[in-house]
Amino acid sequence: MEKQAQKKEMDNKKVVLTGMQPTGKLHLGSLLGALDNWCRMLDSYDCLFFLADQHAITMPHVPAELRRNAMDCVAQYIACGLDPKKCKIFLQSQIIGHAELMWVLSCLTPIGQLERMTQFKDKSKKVGQFVCSGLLFYPILMAADILLYNADLVPVGEDQKQHLEITRDIAQKFNGTYSDMFVLPEPYIGQTGARIMSLQNPTIKMSKSDKNQNGVVYITDTNEIIRKKITGAITDSGNDIAFDEKNKPGISNLLNIFAAIEGISIEEAVRQFSSLTSYVPFKQAVADAVIGKISPMREKYGEIVQDKDYMVEVLRAGREEAQRRANKMISKVYRKVGFVME
Ligand code: TRP
């Protein structure tokens, strides 16, 4: 059995690994900017997807919410197209190895580099007085997530690129200090890489923490709410449908959404609406497209969250495979650093 599994791994495709913090509900931005791209990789790569619940406790949180959000996010991953038959889905905290590898890697990472990380600086400003060491170590845990499975490609957004760079630095440091062990992972920026902005303020990214929730379309929104949010999107006072992110950020955002959903270029999307003389029918068309995309996902999500046995089985299979790989890696690492293994 072990042999078979190893063989499978060897003639396998490149390893793709990525994850998200389980902050609750997925929205149109995470769907078009991340998940859709992950789904496109399912057939060509050895795909591992996880929820970074250990990262989530670096910021103040409510335990019961974290637990519920983690399960909801798993259901939403699947509903959005991450077919558990084609990939492994697991929870970071359920695998013994992420925190262990982080410790080893922390002994190779200079504090100064951690203190200079953009996300650390931003987040420590946000939390104010109490800045925990976990926030400083966040990038090392992320490096451990990636290196534990020797991932070749890591699909991430622009904001996470710096974390990929430090991961490569840490991997190189380990390889140089001990001996070659880790693949240097590459960030993978998807085909569309659509950057979806808030519908109420198209100069900021669509995000769950947006104060104006009318700017955010969730996977769980009803068709009526989706239509209300899209048709109520802030746009300029003109009436021509043109792509101009600087002067017409609202219209450009809607064009981005439409093009990403339809799988067409921005130019093609503009062409489709070129004869319109008002924003109204354009917004209705975008709303139709978003509803067409999200409503089957919302329904599937509704079914999956009800089916506890199915969820448990998906996570069991993901955990088993991830743990098998993690164990192998930790043994190798421990041997290299000089821990007694017998
Ligand atoms: N830091 C990532 C984010 O906030 C989540 C994450 C944690 C991650 N570990 C990872 C992403 C490993 C890719 C690979 O989006």
Image (cartoon, helix red, strand yellow):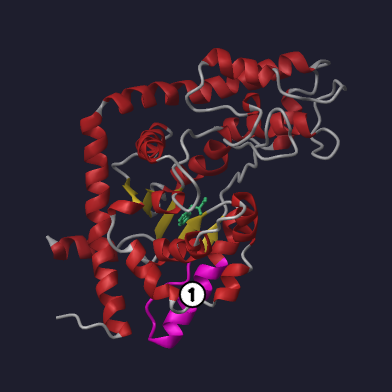
How many residues crowd around disc 1 within 10 Å: few (fewer than 14), some, or many (20 or more)? many
**Three-letter code for the amino acid on which mark 1 is drawn:** Ile
Q: Nearer the viewer, residue 279 or 320?
A: 320
In the image: residue 48, left or right of residue 211: left
Return the x and y of residue 301 as percentages of the image width and height. Answer: 38, 26
Q: Quadrant of residue 68?
A: top left
Give coordinates of residue 244: x percent, y percent: 82, 37
Q: Quadrant of residue 246?
A: top right
Q: Position of residue 332 (x, y in %)?
A: 27, 77
Residue located at (57% from left, 42% from top): 33
Instruction: Inspect the magenta stretch and tell me whether residue 179 lies in it.
Output: yes
Tag 1 residue: 170
Q: Residue at x 84, y 23 (%)?
A: 240
Where does the C terminus fall, quadrant-wise? bottom left
Quarter of the picture containing the N terminus is bottom left
Residue 78 in the magenta stretch? The answer is: no
Residue numbers of the magenta segment:
165-185
Give the overall secondary structure of the magenta segment.
Answer: helix
The local secondary structure at tag 1 comes to helix
Vertical arrangement, residue 164 with respect to residue 88, above or below: below
Q: In the rendered image, is residue 188 in sight?
A: yes
